[in-house]
Amino acid sequence: MSLSLSKKATGVKPSSTLAISAKAGELKAQGIDVVGFGAGEPDFKTPDDICNAAIKAIRDGFTKYTPASGTAELKEVIAKKFEDFNHIHYDPDQIVISNGGKHTLTNVFMTILNKGDEVIIPAPYWLSYPEMVRLADGKPVFVYADKSTSYKVSAKQIEDAITEKTKAIIINSPNNPTGMIYTKKELHDIADLAVKYDFYIISDEIYEYLIYGGEKHHSVASFSKKIYDRTITCSGLSKTYSMTGWRIGYCGAPKEIAKAMGAIQSHLTSNANSIAQKAAVEAISGPQGTVEIMRKEFNKRRLFMLERINAMPHVHMMEPHGAFYAFVDVSEALGMKYKGNKITDTMMMAQVLLDDFHVALVPCTDFGFPDHVRLSYVLGFSQIEKGMDRIERFLKELT
């Protein structure tokens, strides 16, 4: 028998968003002025009170193991946040704190999926969802939306995709990469299917505080007891508090799921970082002014990019109402020529923009939409304006 990697390992695609960001970082390290629209990482620093709470935790010696599923203190704070903001009651023993939102979702899939179980994934989707499902031996089943429905799938489309093997659906609202928000009725119609056909709803609400234009966020688990019993509500601190590197994610779930998730995590990673958990307590229970400051600034950038992009040739974007992404339809530009060479796909487009115009953006093939690209508006106005000018120059050179 020859030595080899597992099929599971070789079947996993690396994250294209992180790859683009890494390439942009390499160019910046060489002194090249790159405008990076790639990563979904706020440009604001973590608020001082949160950082000070972490420093105090270190000085107080809070640097040991905690319970695998999180400290009692943080669970109490998250339970109150669920009650006040999401209008959902979770007891502390229904809450699991993990090493970031990705870890939370991976734990969920590992807990509920058996080999061959199907998870319905509405497209466009965050590129990590299918890989997480496959790592847990599940099967992703994609349901595609389009511009006519503002990139949101209907309950009818989902019902048509349900089989005897359907175990769950994952709903991400506000959505990455589109920035779209499902209405209460749209979510209720989908949730009713979970009750009717008896499958789980994994509600990824990581962008729940980043809402614009008078829209509202709705948590699926708040709708009814039957829906609550089938819903796992996931969130984290990365986006809301600009704490991407701190790696704190969490979920509220039925008790048997939370207990199993904690057991799995106890063997894989033990607990989330103890110091980051102390910082998370301050983030959630402390002053919330910086959250609104960030949201207002993202809103200004959102409106600016919407206007600029829709004034450019060959591209179009719909107005996003949440998160911090511009989801841009570049289908008209594909097939056109740049310096005599046909732009065959969005990966080639992204490479040309990075090499010749020093702009990093994310091709959305791995998000289920190969004729779209994603730009994050998590950088300052001067950078955004510079990047917009460069992209427009590229588009005007196409023939």
Image (cartoon, rainbow, N blue to C red):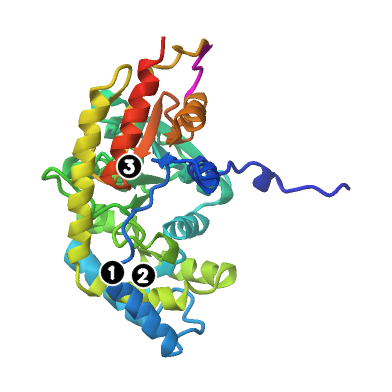
Residue drawn at 52 percent across, 24 percent down: 348
Q: Is residue 92 left or right of residue 120?
A: left
Dot 1 or dot 3: first in sequence order is 1
Q: Which residue is mark 3?
A: 383
* Residue 86 appears in view: no
Q: Which residues are magenta?
A: 341-347
- Mark 2–mark 3 CB contact (< 8 Å): no
Residue 21: percent from left, percent from top: 49, 44
Q: Give how far apart the Cα atoms at labels 2 and 1 are.
A: 7 Å
The residue that disc 1 covers is 90
Kind of residue at disc 3: Gln
Residue 95: image tag: 2
Secondary structure under the numbered disc 3 in the rendered image? helix
- Marks 2 and 3 sit apart, C-alpha to C-alpha, by 39 Å
- Mark number, residue 57: none
Magenta-colored stretch includes residue 305: no
Q: Amino acid at mark 1?
A: Tyr
SS at mark 2?
Answer: strand
